[in-house]
Image: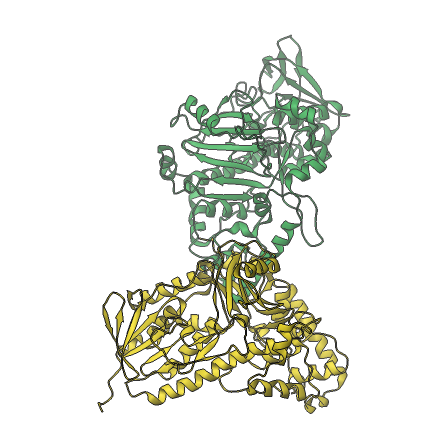
Amino acid sequence: MKSPRPIRKVVIAGRDIAVWLSANVLMRALGDTGLTVEVVEMPGYLRSHDVIGALPPLQGLHHLLGIDEHELLKAVSGAYSLGQRYVNFAGSRPSFFRAYGAHGAPIGGAPFLQHYIQARHKGLKVAFEDFSLAASAAKQGRFFVPDATLSAFHDSQYGYHMNALVYAQVLKNAALRQGVAHIRAHDVSAERRDDYITYLTLSDGRRIDGDFFIDASGADGRLIGGETDSWSAWFPDNRILTVAAEKLTPLPTHAQAIALQGGVLHMAATQDATGLAHVYHADDMDDQQALDLAITIANLRPVSQATAGPLQVGRRRKPWRGNVVALGEAACVFHPIDQVSLHALHLGLVHLLSLFPLNSAFESDAEEYNRLTQEAYEGLRNYQISHFKLNRNLDQPYWDGARNMPIPPELQMKIDLFKACGRILMFDEETFEEEDWASIFFGHGLLPERWDRMCERTPQEVVINQFRQMLGFIREQVEGMSSHEAYIEIYAARNFV
Amino acid sequence: MNNAAIRNIVIVGGGTSGWMAAALFARSLGLVNYTITLVESEDIGTVGVGEATIPPIGFFNRALGLDEDIFVKETQATFKLGIEFVDWKTPGSRYIHPFGSYGVDMDGASFHDFWLRYWRDGGNPDIGLFNIETMAAKANRFGRARGANTPMLNYAFQFDAGLYAAFLRRYAEARGVVRKEGRIVRVEQHAESGFVEAVVCEDGSRIVGDLFLDCSGFRGLLIEQTLKAGYEDWSAWLPCDRAVAVPSEHSHLETGEMAPIPPYTRATARGAGWQWRIPLQHRVGNGYVFCSRFIHEDQACEQLVGSLNGRALKDPKILRFTTGHRRRMWDKNVVALGLASGFLEPLESTSIHLAQLGMSRLLSMMPKREFNPTIIRQYNDMMLFDYVNVKDFLIAHYKVTEREDTPFWRHCRHMDIPDSLKARLEIFAEQGHASVVSTELFKESSWFAVLFGQGLQPRDYSPIADAISLNDLKQRMAKLRTDLQDRLRALPQHDAYIAAHCQASATDMERART
């Protein structure tokens, strides 16, 4: 047994956003420790019309990477997003929002959520989302940057919709500026000793050595290999069609998921186009029908060629195997609902950094990484599953099936506990927080049977008065906000010099 | 006797300023105690370069009690929200100098300061996003409605100067102004004082007066030819000395398509000067103002006609002028108005305004027959103040440029400029203010529009603009923009607005075109 070798060179092989975001993060975090980062770039899968959605935490990552928000949005035709809207998931109930940020404020030491449950039992008709500044703003196409005066009530954040191909290019330019070494290859194959990659052989025969490898090659996992766990039990559709449609006017401040008879249509608006992603089952319709349906439902003219391909959701059982870590779709493929893919890549990188090995003795790091990311990815997945499980589209076979399917026990516990007493059971490594869960639970029509006894300490008139004040505050704030279009136009318009 | 009030007012010349003066004096003084006679000859053409106006024309119309819609119909007018400057900073550049200001002042600092901070922070460099007149101009929209919390648009008119003079003539004659047709062959002066006593026409008729308004145009029949008031030549700073003008059709020469009528004037920089485009209801007024040292008249005509989108309706007409002003615009009992008092090229549509300013100032300072010299001096000082400031503003358009592509532009960019302007440009470059005093015609927002539009970028702004948080600034700017977008959406199309309120009849249009 040799003594552990130091890790001096990381080779990132892959394509598109995953390869370049990884390069940026590793270079920023570890570049000045003497670590060398080399990228082997493979031909991209992204098409010029693809739109990628980002959840609020990406803001923080960009900040660390020194990427200026306005400059980025100008480049990627970016738009802001204050949340997601779900249409047709809850039968005859209205569509609903999951807004980023807080809902209401605590009253008399008890969480707002508990007071809300109590009030609903006492006849309140106002939707949970109406207590969210972000949801109220999004409904009116408004946008705001949270500031100090709002933070007491509202820790709102925002995500983005970006042209994916240009975003990858922006990341690539940033990585190259930082001195990441870069070579191109049509394909790569890994030479292994046991689970350890000794070097990569490129399709042109060149050999690339490295101490540590990152597989950012997409769902194929060209380097990582190994077994995958399919999630198709919960997401039965197996094809995805993407197409860009004309831009939406006024420009919405949210993404939208629409439940179709046998699938889901996802819409994400950028400054100059609307990215449509239609998920369906190949047995139900061909790709042309899928396109026609997407266009009809979105009611927008297509402005690009459509592309369709298989969608196999699931995760790599061991995303860290030997001296290679899989990131992005090489590690996990998600359904497009909730726009979690980019965030999963972000999480993978964060966990990798926190466990990044000094030398080749990293079995325990790998084990911990695999445990953490499994929890993180499955947490995201469970949130997605809940949209299907909790649907109220009665007498539609696709949706009846989803409603009756068995779900992962963690999710079942979470739903059961909420129904019983309005508590949200939180597991480690979950991205979505209590209010994210509460929004969709209420949106889908759940109402807990009980509420926290703490609420009883505050007289009802006080609670009613507080509710009124919150709603009034939100109304006032939203009136004072600018339209999303105006904000973009004066800060981040694509065409400005 | 000398102390008696003026009774007889004689206006020499019946162009735009002559009839404006006749109408205003008839309306303001009445003809009980006064006689007003206007002498003009149909043989002498009028110049009428200034077909575009600026918002103070509204005061003039209101002083006359005009029904604006009738006025617009009668003069084939369109509405004007500003001037678009094309190719001035560099070929391909454009900006709008709008009527009305940018944004709103906040927390004691001007909007310009906040905007500069916003722009320095990476904001959109188009300040026109914060001005409703600019937005409406670009979108070809116009309306006069006033919202609950929103002011009216600031606007002026673009009209046919010949029809305007005819319209005012009807107005003035209906109120008792006597028009005398005839060419003036002699001017009689008091032997000692030199005061003008009468003008004598070809037919021998003699028109006596106490006060003479010289509206005879460039030649200054009374002010210069008779009184030798002297002329201050400003062509060292504003070298253009010719204009060629030609009206054209709205419809496109080849396609026949009618583009929407824009609610603004366009001034496009050319190789040796600049070209105006003034859209009226029945036709488009075009002209090339140039410097004869840099281009031949024939060439200028050719270039103008070649640039037209629509068919030319007349032969190009050449006008020759020397930029500058009469040293004494008011001398003895003669007040020069319009071109007789001076000439500044119509780049900022100031010709009619300066005439209007002169006559309304004269009214408010109406002398007795003794003609108190202090009043005269005061009037001349005030008029000169306006001429100087307008002149400086015009020079800035030529001086502040990045163009070096023709000898004319190289000359302009490197020419010496008046100290008064030099100081302004320096202060603007330093902190974004043009040091405008309140009595000046062109306010800070006009200087900002033009200087920034021509490429002069202030290095700094008022520290007051740093007192609010960046986030707060962002929200305010975005909210301002949102409110303006809402206002814009509420405005009708300019064409449609004219059609609904003040369109000239088809026969009038045809008659006026030809």
Q: Position of residue A467 (x, y in %)?
A: 71, 77
Q: Is residue A128 above or below residue B103?
A: below
> Residue drawn 64% across and 36% down?
B57
Q: Position of A7 compared to A345: left or right?
A: left
Where is residue B6, by image quadrant? top right
> Residue drawn 50% across and 31% down?
B345
Q: Position of residue B379 (x, y in %)?
A: 58, 34
Q: In this view of the protein, can residue B234 be seen by the observer?
A: yes
Spot the residue most to the front: A283
Q: Position of residue A255 (x, y in %)?
A: 57, 66
Quarter of the picture holding the N terminus of chain A? bottom left
Q: Nearer the viewer, residue A15 or B256?
A: A15
Identify the colour of chain B in the image. Answer: green
Q: Position of residue A479 (x, y in %)?
A: 65, 64
Colouring method of the image: by chain
Q: How many circles with numbers are drawn on the protein?
A: 0
Identify the colour of chain A in the image. Answer: yellow
> Residue drawn 67% across and 35% down?
B60
Q: Is residue A492 above or below residue B500?
A: below
Q: Position of B17 compared to B225: left or right?
A: right
Q: Is residue A81 above or below residue B145?
A: below
Q: Nearer the viewer, residue B435 or B400?
A: B400
